[in-house]
Amino acid sequence: MCRHLAWLGAPRSLSDLVLEQPHGLLVQSYAPRRQRHGLMNADGWGVGFFAAERKQPARWRSSRPLWADPSFASVAPVLSAGCVLAAVRSATAGMPLDETAAAPFQSGRWLMSHNGVVDRAILGPHPDAESVCDSAQLAAHLFDYGPERTAEFVADVGSRDPGARLNVLLTDGHQIIATRWNDTLSYLHRDDGVVVASEPYDDDPRWADVPEHHLVEVSGDTVTLTELEA
Ligand code: GLN
């Protein structure tokens, strides 16, 4: 499974968030600590972030492993944002391996990442999906359904596909919405903002694990956990 992370708070550099943490996404791309499915995340990566002067997020995605992208490593220290969503990918068997299958997926202001697997037959094809990859299909359906209804969406898809793993992570630059549905999820509430991530990127004792089948909403300085219908 993939690993993903979102930040909402004071501006931080992409390098700080994605590359420099001792167990951050760069290390998680080859040595994740809590990953249950798949050994590494070498099938691409992506980051989306919001700049004050633009309504829509900027995205940088690649089909290469994160560790093999020296140009990003060079630029990342000088790109800062108060809202960032990033992911490293371990492709599910049979899924395409190009950049369009790497999260984050986008619709208008919304960015979405999926850590998991879902039966595409349950969803049906979506004409606006960025890729035939299950995660891109899931994103297109969720964007249509309405990100503010993520809890209902995940519970519905989960009930129709009991084998699905549906850890999703969304942001529109003002809030983070995430679900834990059959994979790991944690959050870190710092003085200057909140991180939601598949697994802790360091050993800060303030990291908290999200219980299974829960929704996480981050708005301003507030983190709300709600149980999802399983
Ligand atoms: N199923 C998605 C893909 O193939 C996500 C896989 C994952 O979470 N590792 O990209």
Image (cartoon, rainbow, N blue to C red):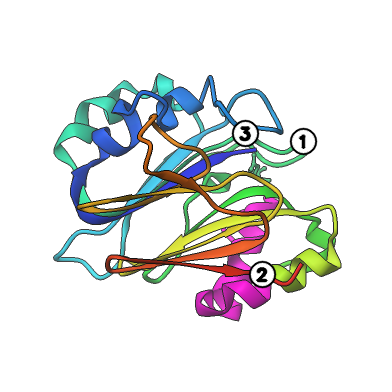
Q: Is residue 201 visible?
A: yes
Identified at 66% across, 46% down, the residue is 183
Secondary structure beneath label 2: loop
Measured Cα–Cα span from mark 3 to mark 2: 26 Å
Q: Look at the magenta stretch and give its main secondary structure.
A: helix
Q: Is residue 151 left or right of residue 25?
A: right
Front residue of 168 and 78: 168
Identified at 77% across, 67% down, the residue is 230
* The stretch drawn in magenta includes residue 7: no
Q: Pointer 3: what residue?
A: 90
The magenta span reads 126-153
Give percent across and percent down for residue 163. 84, 52
Give the answer, above or below, for where 79 lies relative to 155: above
Q: Pointer 1: what residue?
A: 93
Q: Which of the two discs, 2 and 1, sits closer to the camera?
A: 2
Identified at 24% across, 57% down, the residue is 9
Q: Is residue 132 visible?
A: no
Q: Is residue 81 left or right of residue 120?
A: left
